[in-house]
Image (cartoon, rainbow, N blue to C red):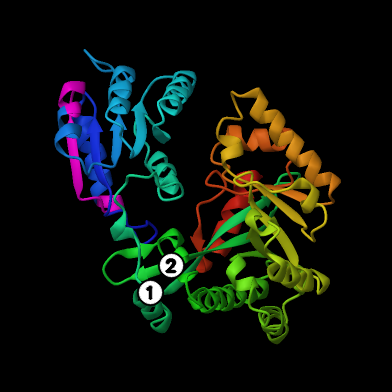
Amino acid sequence: MSSNHLTYAWLKALIVDDSKAICELCKSILIENYGINYVHTTNSAPEALAVIKSFKDINMIFLDLNMPGTDGVQLLKKIADFKFKGYIVIVSGVSAKIIQGVEDLANKYNLNYIGSIHKPIDLKDFDHIFTQVGKNTPSGINNKTKQLKIYEIIRALEKDAIEVFYQPQVKLRNRKFIGVEALCRLHHPRLGLISPDQFIDKSEETDLIFHLTLCVIDKALNDWVLWHNQGMKLTLSINISPYVLKFTEFTDLFLTKLSVLNIPIEKICLEVTESIIEENHQVELETLSRLAIKGVMLSLDDFGTGSASIERLHRLPFDELKLDKSFFQNSITNRAQFDLIKSCVAMSSALDMHTVAEGIETAEHWKVAEQTGCDIVQGYYISKPIQACDISQWCYQWKHRVD
């Protein structure tokens, strides 16, 4: 299994397709590329329903639509009748409009649809699907094996098993590579490369989140120095938990690290989620204000996933608004969603903030971001998260891609 893939061994998958060849291909991809060893395959809806009924721990279904007898749409309704709480993935060669209609049905059935894989099979589609897994884990999924213990996180820190990956950011107006977002991963001796949703929440239960954040900051700042010495003038964005901002010493500690490495303050952006806007975060907001006064850029991350108050937003020192990827998922066919993005961009501009579009995964998403006036884009259409040593080569490839 590639070290760039996360481990999804906790998933138990069912593939439903009348083509045995497609079933075997998908099965081999799940096992070899994603470490999923529990994979059932069936070639008809009745077989699939029998498996779902018999094996209650199945938590991911790959579903073909165009099957003889009971088709995929009919099967989707029957799956909903079982109160299935796992992930649903459509695998089909039908048009995007039909896929969109099926997605709407899945949502009406309260199923957790996370995307589609188009035939003929492309591995990039699987990568897209697995970026969604874990970001919105549905209730009812048995994901106990996902959650790391405190001692495992401590061991990772002690053994320098924390690794930082970087997702490039591009300015829409000129398509110039301008920065990266640092994304934390943990190397587990048994489970492999672990995503942050498997250890951040547990870290936030103790002071461990502070030490973990400092570890990521140290690695990311040193990588920035390396890129700077190679001639790349990039902005570095780092996610900061609100729990870290409770530590009053954080500001001075962070600014000292920048000074020691001679990193210009304006080249660093700290991202916090919109929950920070809530009234009960006074200490955290004081920390943000101190950072802003010193010239650190501040970004409001995942905007649109919570209940941020616009009235409070304009009183806070944010420089950047990051639109959550959910804004763009239906924006191509949903005019109301398109208009909502435009409204958010207009609001951001009125508040003297620039807008970053996250989750740009297709050329169509890029076009929507462009048409709605977003300033910066990031997502799998531009690049998946990559290691620090690969940034220089990616920069070279991007220049040739846009020329």
From this view, report whether residue 323 is shown above or below residue 232: above
- The residue located at (34%, 29%) in the rendering is 91
Question: What amino acid does circle 2 point to?
Answer: Lys
| Displayed quadrant of residue 237 | bottom right
Query: What SS does tag 1 mark?
Result: helix
Which residue does the numbered mark 2 point to in the structure image? 202
Front one among 278 and 204: 278
Q: Position of residue 20 (x, y in %)?
A: 17, 29
What label does residue 150 carry, if any? 1
Residue 10 position, x and y percent, is 27, 53
**Mark 2, other Cα within 10 Å: few <14 / some 14–19 / many ≥20:** some
Query: Is residue 273 in view?
Result: yes
Rendered location of residue 118, percent (x, y):
39, 29
Q: Specify the segment rendered in magenta.
A: 32-49
Q: Is residue 372 visible?
A: no
Q: Image point 74% across, 40% down: which residue?
A: 344
Look at the image and say whether residue 42 sits in the magenta stretch: yes
Q: What is the C-alpha distance between the residues marked 1 and 2? A: 7 Å
Instruction: Tell me if label 1 and label 2 are in contact, CB under 8 Å.
Output: yes
Indicate left or right for 245 with 352 as reference: left
Q: Quadrant of the N terminus?
A: bottom left
Count of numbered circles on the image: 2
